[in-house]
Image (tube, coloured by chain):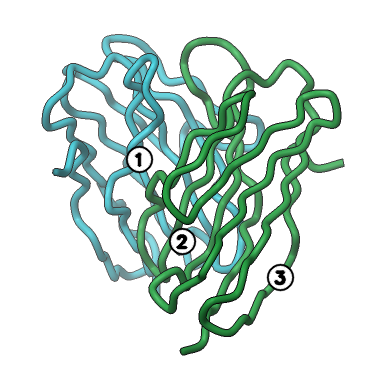
Chain colours: A cyan, B green
Amino acid sequence: GAVVSQHPSWVICKSGTSVKIECRSLDFQATTMFWYRQFPKQSLMLMATSNEGSKATYEQGVEKDKFLINHASLTLSTLTVTSAHPEDSSFYICSLDRGSQPQHFGDGTRLSIL
Amino acid sequence: RKEVEQDPGPFNVPEGATVAFNCTYSNSASQSFFWYRQDCRKEPKLLMSVYSSGNEDGRFTAQLNKASQYVSLLIRDSQPSDSATYLCAVTSGGSNYKLTFGKGTLLTVNP
C-alpha cells in the first residue's frame, strides 16, 4: 500500500502564482524527506532535503527563496513554488527517508505554468 | 563525467527477449544501489535493491561490480508489461539515502 501521499497530482496555474505541494508520510514518522524535480526525458534531480523542525538543505543551483520547504511535523513536508513561471513547469516528486529501507516516492505533482 | 550514467536507449525488443541495462557511477564511496521502474508520467517505483553478491527476483537479475563501479539489470523473457523507463539510482553515502539517478533507459517490449 501507499506509504507516501502527495497532493495535488496536477496543477495548472497562471504565471506569478505560488503553488504549494504537500507530501505526507502515511505509516512512518519521517524526520527526513526529499524533494525531486524531473523535466521531460530527464532524470530525477534532487532539489532539497527536508528536515523536520529545522531548515531544509538545498542542492547547488536550487534557489531556497524560490522553493520554500516546510517540514513542521513528522508526517508532512510542503514545497511552495513561489511566483511560478513557465520554466518552473515540471514533475515534482517527494520521497521518504525510511532509514535502512530504500526510498518510496509520492505519486508526484505535475506542475504546468501558463 | 556524470555521477550516474545509463545506456541512452531506447530499447525496442520483441516479447520473450532478454534485455540488459547498464549503469556506471562515478562516486567510489557509494554504498547502496537500486533499480527503479518509471511508467510514463508516474512516480518511480522500486524494482530491486542491488547487493554486492548479485540478486535475482523472478525474471530480473541485478549485478554489482564495485571495482568497475558498474551496476546491471537483466530482464529475461521480457513481457509487454515490462515496457517502462528503467532508472539506476545510487546513494551518495551516509545513512540518509540521498539518491542520485541516471537519466533512465526506455524499454518497449512488443507483443
Q: How far from the left and from the top, in percent, is residue B34?
A: 53, 37
Q: Nearer the viewer, residue B1 or A8?
A: B1
The residue that label 3 is drawn on is B9
Residue name at image x 28 percent, y 52 percent: A19
**Which quadrant would the N terminus of chain A be assigned to in this image?**
top left
Q: Chain of mark 3?
A: B
- The correct choice, above or below, for B62 with respect to B37 in the image is above
The residue under the point 62% across, 50% down is B73
Q: Which mark is residue A90?
A: 2
Q: Chain of mark 2?
A: A
Q: Amino acid at mark 2?
A: Ser
> Is residue B84 toward the left or the right of residue B21 in the image?
left
Q: CA distance from mark 3 to mark 1?
A: 26 Å
Residue B60: x and y, percent?
A: 50, 52
How far is mark 1 from mark 2, CA to CA? 13 Å
Q: Do the residues at pointers 2 and 3 share their chain?
A: no
Of residues A60 and B42, the one drawn nearer to the viewer in this rendering: B42
